[in-house]
């Protein structure tokens, strides 16, 4: 029944060691989003894919990259994690086009940087 | 510019009490969507409701109800007869219908604590 799946749920990495978080969806939605959420804050949009088109938010650090090899999967790569990148990372999907649709979120991956 | 304000940082209630969460938004657009999401301690953002700016009808879903008032730019959320399982952070959000991909502007969230 899971619609937006994120793996792993918990990820521990070392300072500077690249890490990849994954997201998959069974909704066949054409838009996929990555958010970063730090403690006691609202989610912050990092980037989104509209079909195959990648759209970066202006204030997303270069350290964060994303890949979407097909409709169902999307990856978040953190090239050199710093202590400040420890956060919950949320993936979301929506069916967008002529009108705005609802974003559905996955369970998140909680990243710890040692 | 769009903005969503949730002035209440935390609300604590005893089980079975009603609790109302305030949401005030700012936008220059005439068409937009408003949302409420629930984030329990597990971390997942759970979609609760979406409201189109043209639809000012209030909505009730079980113990949840929403009051949309365009005149005051508010979209308040009430939990009736609260339960411990309602303990979570609740986010109000706004998106523009002109954004075909639906960028969400979140409020800062309101932590609801329900004690037995």
Image (cartoon, rainbow, N blue to C red):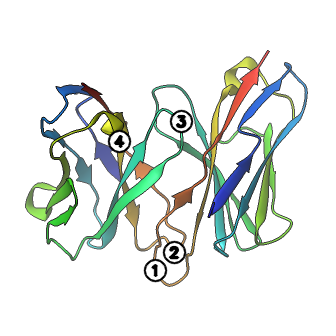
Viewer-side label of 3, 1: 3
Disc assigned to residue B100: 2
Q: Is residue A97 visible?
A: yes
List x then y, in percent, for residue A75: 80, 52
List x then y, in percent, for residue B30: 26, 72
In the picture of the structure, the residue carrying the numbered disc 4 is B90
In the picture of the structure, the residue carrying the numbered disc 3 is B42
Viewer-side label of 3, 4: 3
Viewer-side label of 1, 4: 4
Circle 3 packing at 10 Å, graded few (<14), some (14-19), many (20+), is few
Q: Is residue A51 above or below residue B116?
A: below
SS under mark 3: loop
Viewer-side label of 3, 2: 3
SS under mark 4: strand
- Report whether B28 appears left or right of A80: left
SS under mark 2: loop
In the picture of the structure, the residue carrying the numbered disc 1 is A99
Contact? badges 4 and 2 (CB < 8 Å): no
**Marks 3 and 4, how far apart in space?**
13 Å
Q: Earlier in the sequence, mark 3 or mark 2?
A: 3
**Marks 1 and 2, how far apart in space?**
5 Å
List x then y, in percent, for residue A1: 62, 64
Contact? badges 1 and 2 (CB < 8 Å): yes
Quarter of the image where one finds residue A93: bottom right
SS under mark 1: loop
Query: Which residue is painted at 53% across and 38% down in the image?
Result: B43
């Amino acid at each position: 029944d899971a619609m937006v799946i994120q793996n792993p749920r918990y990820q521990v990495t070392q300072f500077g060691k690249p890490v990849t978080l994954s997201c998959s969806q069974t909704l066949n939605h054409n838009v996929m989003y990555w958010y970063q959420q730090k403690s006691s804050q609202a989610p912050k949009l990092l980037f989104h894919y509209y079909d195959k088109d990648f759209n970066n938010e202006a204030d997303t650090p270069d350290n964060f990259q994303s890949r979407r090899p097909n409709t169902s999967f999307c990856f978040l790569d953190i090239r050199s994690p710093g202590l400040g990148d420890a956060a919950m990372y949320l993936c979301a999907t929506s069916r967008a086009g002529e009108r705005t649709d609802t974003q559905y979120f996955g369970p998140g991956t909680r990243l710890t940087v040692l | 510019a769009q903005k969503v304000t949730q002035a209440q940082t935390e609300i604590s209630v005893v089980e079975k009490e009603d609790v109302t969460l305030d949401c005030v938004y700012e936008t220059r657009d005439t068409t937009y969507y408003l949302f409420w999401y629930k984030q329990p301690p597990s971390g997942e953002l759970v979609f609760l409701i979406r409201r189109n700016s043209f639809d000012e009808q209030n909505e009730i879903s079980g113990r949840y109800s929403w009051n949309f008032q365009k005149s005051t730019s508010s979209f308040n959320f009430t939990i009736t007869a609260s339960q411990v399982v309602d303990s979570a952070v609740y986010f109000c959000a706004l998106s523009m219908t002109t954004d075909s991909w639906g960028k969400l502007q979140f409020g800062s969230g309101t932590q609801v604590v329900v004690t037995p």
